[in-house]
Image (cartoon, rainbow, N blue to C red):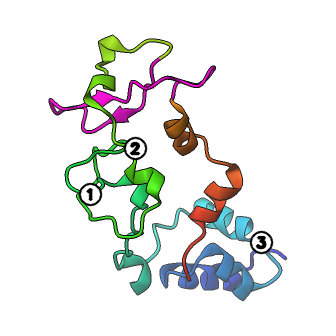
Amino acid sequence: MSWTDERVELLKKLWSEGLSASRIAAELGGITRNAVIGKVHRLGLSGRAKSVSASAPRARKARSPALLRIGRGAIRGNTALAHAYELEEAEPELIDNIIPIGQRRTLLELSEQTCRWPVGDPGSGDFFFCGGNTLSPLPYCAYHARIAYQPAADRRRDRRPAR
């Protein structure tokens, strides 16, 4: 279908009301979302009005217990931005991964055989790397390799929105 004056005016009206390009395409009929976006661009229309739901802040998804501090002062994984939370029903292997002081390494102490998993805030004095024995071609120990290299299916499942 072609862009008649009436269709262009309706497009402008719907765009200013904050409808999405897909919704406008459905309202106009016979055109695609991309056609709407292209016409909006050619007309030089400004950003559309925000709907009430779009302007409201979104609820944040809770962090996985695997990324948080565990128990009383024990550190596991990169906790630079994590808050101290009590872990209620964690997997035992998460709690058991407390890195011994003798195993911890600074950046200058790392080698091909030591785990390069960062722990803590790099700006603080108690930042360190895991320092455990690495798996052959990987830069991490067995524990941190399981965290770093997750199967693609698991990553996709975690990104699905909760309903």
Please tell me whether residue 136 belongs to the stretch shown in magenta.
Answer: yes
Q: Residues within 10 Å of mark 3 (few under 14, many from 20)?
A: some
Task: Between residue 44 and residue 98, name the one nearer to us.
Answer: 98
Task: Between residue 123 and residue 68, name the one nearer to us.
Answer: 68
The answer to whether the residues at label 1 and label 3 have Cβ atoms under 8 Å apart is: no
Residue 104 x %, y %: 31, 25
Can you tell which quarter of the image residue 117 is in? top left
Residue 151 x %, y %: 68, 49
Q: Split into 4 quadrants, where in the image is the C terminus?
A: bottom right
Q: Split into 4 quadrants, where in the image is the N terminus?
A: bottom right
Residue 102 x %, y %: 28, 23
What amino acid is at disc 2? Asn
Report the residue at 54% width, 77% height from top.
162
Q: Which residue is mark 2?
A: 97
Please tell me whether residue 8 belongs to the stretch shown in magenta.
Answer: no
Q: Secondary structure at mark 3?
A: loop
Sequence-first disc among 2 and 1: 1
In 3D space, how far apart are the residues under numbered discs 2 and 1 (Cα atoms)?
12 Å
* 91 relative to 119 in the view: left or right: right
Q: Which residue is mark 3?
A: 32
Q: Secondary structure at mark 2?
A: loop
The magenta stretch is 114-140
In 3D space, how far apart are the residues under numbered discs 1 and 3 (Cα atoms)?
54 Å
What amino acid is at disc 3? Thr
What amino acid is at disc 1? Gly
